[in-house]
Amino acid sequence: MFAFIPPQSIALGQLSQLAMLIVAVIIGFRHRHLMSGSVLLWIGVAYVLYVLGRGVIAAFLEQPELTIAHLDGTSSWARTIVLPTIIFGLVLLATGNWARHATGAIVALVLGVLAFEVLPAWSWNELTAALQGSSRYIFGMGHSRSGFLIGAALILALGFAPALVSGLSNNGSATRSGAKYLRFFLWVMIITVLLIALFATKTRTAWFAVLPATFVVVLAAAWIYRDRLFKPQALIGMLALVMLVAGVIVAGWGELERRLTSAGEGMQQTLQMQSLADAWELEDRNVGARVAYKVFAIQLWVDRPLAGWGPAEPYYLMDKRPIPPLLEGRSGHFHDAHVEILARLGLTGWLLIMAFVACLMFEAFRMIAGNGRNKALSSMLALTGIGFAVLMLVWMLGTHQITRFQSSHVIAVFLGPICASHFQRLVQASE
């Protein structure tokens, strides 16, 4: 919750992270004989040590004139995805009931976003204008972040939906049955609101990220609850979801078509590219500029494929190297966190992050297949984590915000429960 209290939000949030780090170190030391067998933990440690080493070498040996920039970048990238997730996972383990407290943390995150970001900046007029016209409404956040958080909320609603759907199949009194159907109706309303909100952001990156994430969650849920898949209540739930998505698409088709085709020329030129050198011929200042940024970043990576140029922002190289004409006079990020990682940390850094995420996904499926006192809740957290990971990886293709503190604590809250389950399994195996 500290992350949402302005203007001291970052300082308070970092203090809370420090407190969690202390707890994580204590728990890790207490179970050090078990943690030594954790591939997930060792990949995380390898990533952090690699970033620290790469930053020190770049700052003091390769480019001493950029010492401060490299050290700042080292701090940011060391705290990206991996470290916050591990710390939060160990803190959840320390609570004694990681699944329940993980759910509480997610609820606190949702309430924090609503109370400190969405509601203070709320405007019916701007929302209406976004739904009816070509403007966008970002709910008091940046357009990329608003789309990402709304997409994460949608994945959360889908991930926790099976519990409600399965509850509807139980027999009970009329009052209890009516209450369950009321909860189902509220869930449908939440999905509807989130779909409308996602449309209002007009954020194409979030739209494209939500599609595969939703598909993965629905497919995984269908496998997990396959024995209940063809029951009337489950069929009603799936039909309601399909109708909601179709309804939003039909209602907003004009604006969807405009947003998706407004950059049609740039996309066409991009698809016709036969080599990276063709980026010098791009003219579209929207999609074309983004592609040109990616091409420039890829060329930087090709020059130093394994270790990259160091954690500092590499944009200064735009003044020292040939760039596509479309980028002349521009500065700023590369609009793609994947190529940012490759350009800064090289293939080594990118593979370590992807390996960490892959280990989390493997552990998530173990959570789904396992048994325990929190089996249902654990499965829903795993399902949500799987969908969130897909959402994050696709979202990274169109944004640079992965290193920001506002992104780190969201990622930790959604992926940390999977880490906690992994550590809990190691502890139980030794008992």
Image: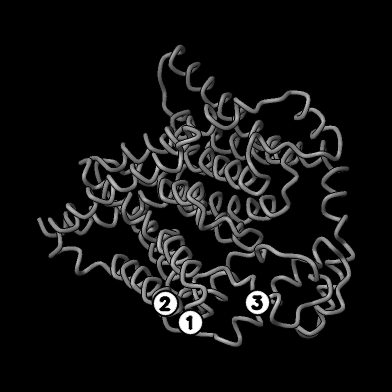
Residue 309 vs residue 283: left or right?
Answer: left
- Gap between marks 1 and 3 measured at Cα: 16 Å
What is the x, y in percent for residue 240? 65, 35
Secondary element at tag 2: helix
**Closer to the N terminus: mark 1 or mark 3?**
1
- Gap between marks 2 and 1 measured at Cα: 7 Å
**Closer to the N terminus: mark 3 or mark 2?**
2
Mark 3: which amino acid? Leu
What is the x, y in percent for residue 66? 51, 73
Residue linked to disc 1: 307
What is the x, y in percent for residue 97? 24, 40
Residue 137 vs residue 325: left or right?
Answer: left
Find residue 429 and report its image quarter: bottom left
What is the x, y in percent for residue 381? 40, 45
Image quadrant in which the N terminus is located: top left
Residue 58: assigned label:
none
From the viewer's perspective, is residue 176 above or below residue 402? Answer: above
**Closer to the N terminus: mark 2 or mark 1?**
2
Residue linked to disc 2: 54
Residue linked to disc 3: 317
Q: Do callouts 2 and 1 mark residues in contact (Cβ within 8 Å)?
A: yes
Image quadrant in which the C terminus is located: bottom left
Q: Residue at x 52, y 80 (%)?
A: 308
Q: Residues within 10 Å of mark 3 (few under 14, many from 20)?
A: some
Considering every residue shown, the one lying at the far left of the view is 431
Secondary element at tag 1: loop
Secondary element at tag 3: helix
